[in-house]
Image: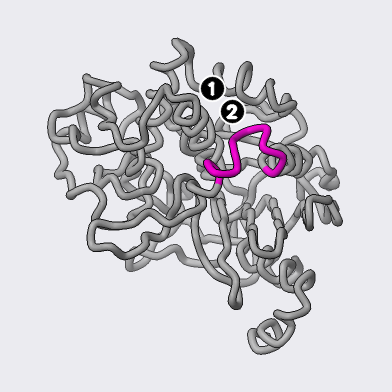
Amino acid sequence: MTKEMIPGLALAVIQNGHVVKEATYGVASVELMVPVTLTTSFPLASMTKVFTAAAIMRFVQRGRLQLDEPVARILPQLPAKWSAVTIRECLAHTSGLPDVFTDGINGTAIAGTLRGMFAALRKMPVQPPGERSVYNQTGYVLLGMIIEKMTSMKYAAYMESHFFQSLGLTELRFGDAWAIIPGEADLYTKLDITPDHLKLLVHDGQPVFLHHRILRYGAKFFPTYLAPAATLNGSIRDLVTWETELADGKVLSTSTLTEMATPYRLRDGKPGVFGLGFTIGKIGPYRTVSYEGGAATWRLSIPAKRLTVIVLTNLQGSSPDQIAAGTARLYLPELSHDSAARR
């Protein structure tokens, strides 16, 4: 934390079905010196997507949706050139659709309303679906619209009052930086900003890191239609409950979870980077299944070892993936050589 200048962090480790570590460190607010607790809420950012994916997969599991049916069959108002895109391709970031974000580093949306989003995106080219893994927000906006169509409710209202409620996740809340979330940590960044203080600084397409200080982060403002992709807030206790419910089969069946954690097979036969809501990777000889948000939060699971690590921080650019992987190595002695090599 000292090396990365992380103000506050919450960590949980679940091994063989048991929570073996649950701890907090540092402060939720640098200005007020409020300590992080197990119930401190953090902006989960793109971690939101795995909850959206799970809600969609519950409809699939119940036979109300088919993964390979075109999204346009459910949402006929979509542009005609989007008609070939399927639910599976939206889940796996292989839709080929133009992205809602015009600047992924700053999270700048192309329009402030859903109508404005469609007006802008319908003019942009569409790539052939299923050919490449390209992280994409638009597909998850469409998945949220499908949930609304299936439930006749607004996405956030359905998720909070039905999906989360049924799992005991009563403290999870949707909202961007304008929303008041009880007990939420302030968000900071180790990325530099433009001279006018309006955006994060980008050079040659990459963010510019600060090396000796951090800044308060004031840019997490998202239109409502981006809720299915980015605006959930929750604590380490919430995430532990979520992971426990997933493991116990209370959210989805084991076979459905296995399908979600399997890389999408691209049109050329090669595996993609993503499953259905999850990112697929590797640590040592083991396959990892992860989801993450805002370069500040990370969940890493190693199915073969029944090990899950959850890291929530309040610093953008905190390398939470490395913290999660390093923590996992502490619980896997056979990776000690690999860990030493990395050091």
Which residue was labeled with disc 1? 156
223 and 162: which one is in front?
A: 162
User: How far is the residue under mark 1 from the one under mark 2?
Assistant: 7 Å
Q: Which mark is residue 183?
A: none
Q: Tag 1: Cα neighbours inside 10 Å, few (<14), some, or many (≥20)?
A: many
Residue drawn at point x = 43 percent, y = 27 percent:
144
Question: Disc 1, disc 2: CB below 8 Å?
Answer: yes
Q: Is residue 106 left or right of residue 98?
A: right
Percent x, y of residue 106:
43, 49
Q: Which image quarter holds the N terminus?
A: bottom right
The answer to whether residue 196 is seen in the rendering is: no
Give the mark, 1 or 2, whose residue is nearer the N terminus.
1
Magenta highlight range: 247-257
At mark 2, the secondary structure is strand
Q: Is residue 241 above or below residue 136?
A: above
At mark 1, the secondary structure is helix
Q: Is residue 110 left or right of residue 248?
A: left
Q: Which image quarter holds the C terminus?
A: bottom right
Residue 82 falls within the magenta-colored stretch:
no
Residue type of the residue flagged with mark 1: Ala
Residue type of the residue flagged with mark 2: Phe
Q: Quadrant of residue 172?
A: top right
Q: Is residue 9 above or below residue 230?
A: below
48 and 100: which one is in front?
A: 48
Percent x, y of residue 179:
60, 26
Q: Tag 2: Cα neighbours inside 10 Å, few (<14), some, or many (≥20)?
A: many
Residue drawn at point x = 57 percent, y = 28 percent:
175
Q: Is residue 256 above or below residue 307?
A: above
Q: Which one is closest to the eye, mark 1 or mark 2?
A: 1
Q: Which mark is residue 174?
A: 2
Q: How many marks?
A: 2
